[in-house]
Amino acid sequence: MGTEMIVLYLVYWYNNFIIRRFSLFADFIKILFMNKIIIFFVVLNILSCNKDKKQIPKSKFIIHRDSISIDTPKNINPMEVYWQFIKTKNISYLIDTDIPLNNLFIYDLQHKKWQTLNFTQEGPNGIGIGTGFYYYNKDSIFIVSGYQNKIFLFNKNIQKIKEYKIPKSFDINLYTIRKGFINNSKLFIPFTSFIKKDKRYTKNSKLLLKIDINTGNTTPLIKYPNSMLNKKWNTELLQMSYLIEKDTIYSSFCALDSIFLYDLKGKLICKKYAKSKYLDHIEPLSNNVDSNSYKAKNKLYQNGFYGGLISDTKYFYRLAYHLPKNFTKKNITRKNLILSVLIFNKNLEFLNEIILKKGGGYYHFITEKGLTVSANPNFTENLTEGKRKFYTYKFEKI
């Protein structure tokens, strides 16, 4: 009996061992299977997110194109990067300047007439060396003197009303895509605070200056996004285009695929994906490449870049400069680039991206005729003596 009991015990133990082993193996298979399901859904979710990031057109537009041609007398020589558009009392004006800033040239689009405002460098109304301007209205003309680190406020009689001091580490230059805005007695102007000459992408750099018009107090706003820090970029890619609507600052960086939204204190609210289908992800320069060299310029034009951010009552427009499809030349210049416009509704939902067949210059704004862009300055049509040309685009949703 003792031997039989031992044999029975061994059989019982063996069976339990096999069952337990099989059970553990089954559990392992079950866990593996479940993990595969989890991994599958994670991957599916990632793919789904990426799918959402593809800019799928939601609307179609009929495009109405027109042009504006301006005669410029010999005594008027407006620059190609300073144009501003303003409308007062149902009259529309284009405003530009010379370099260094001695005059403002004001063109009445309705009556096709020029007016010139002359500024002096010295004296009680002197501006020194002017480097930019923001024409808010006839009695609020802001002149920037980057060398003196000051902004001067003039009235329509070219009398200096007030001056505002700018911190010395700031570099200010008002281009069309970087114009000023006034909101609740605060003047917002684009600038860059350079801590070191060759490190414009440092964490301490700010890109917008808020000035209290009444007190003169200044507040730097908006840092470069983290994806741009500690990297070397073309000078052009360090630019930020922006606009202010209600209590929100909308910012478009020339190198990034998103539009960034900030409150009026410069705090990031969110960012919206806004990539052109014609641009690949823009990469920084290698550390051994000079940011202003031919090699850097060639890479800039080869990759393409984003231009201004503009809006009207219905849409936001983001401009993108890029090479035409199937472009094969090795030596690329600015005139080889074409221009497309990404159209968004007022919630920044993507509607469509359209190539503009005419225009491609440096300046752009909204007029009564719609989105207005300059002729490419490298094209002969805009180099004709005494002529400046713009193209207008009105987008009708269908």
Image: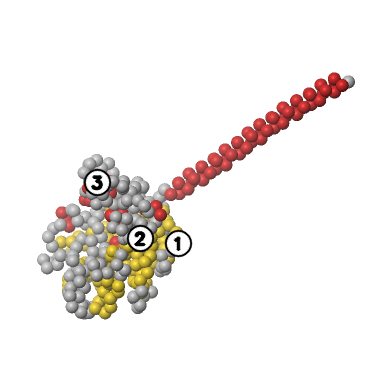
Mark 3 lies on residue: 295
Q: Secondary structure at mark 2?
A: loop
What's under tag 1, amino acid-wise?
A: Ile
On the image, which quarter does residue 72 sit in? bottom left
* Rendered residue at 34%/75% (across/down): 216
* Rendered residue at 88%/20% (across/down): 1
In the rendered structure, which disc, 3 or 2, sits on the residue that comes first in sequence? 2
What's under tag 3, amino acid-wise?
A: Lys
**Residue 51: image x %, image y %?**
45, 46
Vertical relation: 62 (above or below) 84: above
134 sits left or right of 19 in the view: left
* Rendered residue at 11%/66% (across/down): 74
**Residue 347: image x %, image y %?**
43, 60
Mark 2 lies on residue: 205
In the rendered structure, which disc, 1 or 3, sits on the residue that comes first in sequence? 1
Q: Nearer the viewer, mark 1 or mark 2?
A: 2
Mark number displayed over residue 269: 1
Within 10 Å of disc 3 (Cα), the crowding (few <14, some 14-19, many 20+) is few
Q: Secondary structure at mark 1?
A: strand
